[in-house]
Image (cartoon, rainbow, N blue to C red):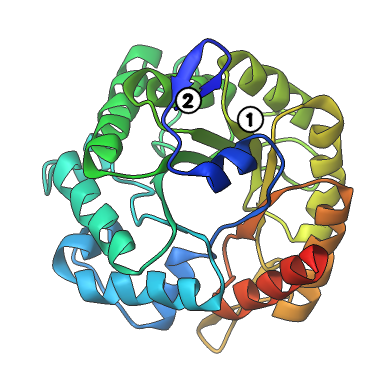
Amino acid sequence: MGASGNRCVRVKDEYLQGVLDKRERLLFDGAMGTMIQKNGLVSTGPLELLCLDEPEAVTDIHRAYVQAGSQVVTTNTFGANAMKLDGIASVDDVYAAAVACARESGARYVAADIGPLGELLDPYGDITYDEAYGLFAEAARAAGGAGADLVIVETMTDLTELTAAVRAALDSTDLPVFATMTFGEGGRTFMGVSPEDAVETLEELGVDALGINCSLGPESLLPFAQTMLDASEKPVIVQANAGLPAVSEGETRYSIGPAEYAAAVRRMLDAGVTIVGGCCGTDPAYIEQLSKALSELDA
């Protein structure tokens, strides 16, 4: 057991404790949705149901990332909350299947993914804070019960929803909790949140690592990451997109290739970011390049 503030945290091993203490670096995986699309997988409902319907195919995606160098694979549970699943499957069953798929890949760590609800919270939408907290708490409990090693709350744009999700995860599990927000080119989220706002909120909540994911390429996110590094003592995580998407001949392509991506992430690592991976558009080729960059730093 480790400690984060007044909270006891169940840390899987000494290496992960070193990550939380900023003594070690950690490599996540890349995009799940990109790989689902590349592999031609189709679900009759939410993509999270593939963990139940096509578990071997989901494990194959995780395994490809492990073979590329990922120390952490992220469960296919981005939208696995009761509202989005809408009775098609239970939250517990989806997380149990998703963690099993991830574990089967041989990854050192399994991160249980919790994404946004997809609906605005009060006063901008109809979902109350308490309703959101309940949905996130159910997901976090399912993640812990399924045997995940950590929880990652990601792609948040609203501080109220971020608070509900992170607090629910902290209250419902004793696992390390990472949290990331997604910022646009102007340096704010869709809901107007700045990196400084995010750090202040996440520090107060007591997350174990904080940072940025999605939206932009790594070069564009570097200044926002630097702001977070300057403002926080926590480990900073960045999982950027492979640049901006464009549709060509019916296929979505991204503007930044693996080598360019890794070179930009290397600058983040040099600046002090200690946890990296990829988001939309990234695949095992990107992770392989990141793994090489980390190896060079450790040489």
Q: Residue at x 39, y 44 (%)?
A: 149
- Relative to 187, does residue 246 appear above or below in the rendering? below
Please give the count of numbered marks on the rendered protein: 2
Q: Residue at x 64, y 75 (%)?
A: 286
Name the mark on residue 191: 1
- Of the 4 image quadrants, the one containing the C terminus is bottom right
Q: Residue at x 57, y 63 (%)?
A: 280
Q: In this rendered view, identify the residue nearer to me: 70 or 254.
A: 70
- Determine which quarter of the picture holds residue 102: bottom left
Q: In this rendered view, identify the residue nearer to me: 110 or 201.
A: 110
Q: Which residue is mark 2?
A: 166
Confirm whether residue 163 shows in the render: yes
Q: Are there few (<14), some (14-19), or many (20+) residues within 10 Å of tag 2?
A: many
Q: Amino acid at mark 2?
A: Val
Q: Position of residue 96 (x, y in %)?
A: 20, 49
> Is label 1 or label 2 in front?
2
- Relative to 291, does residue 188 appear above or below in the rendering? above
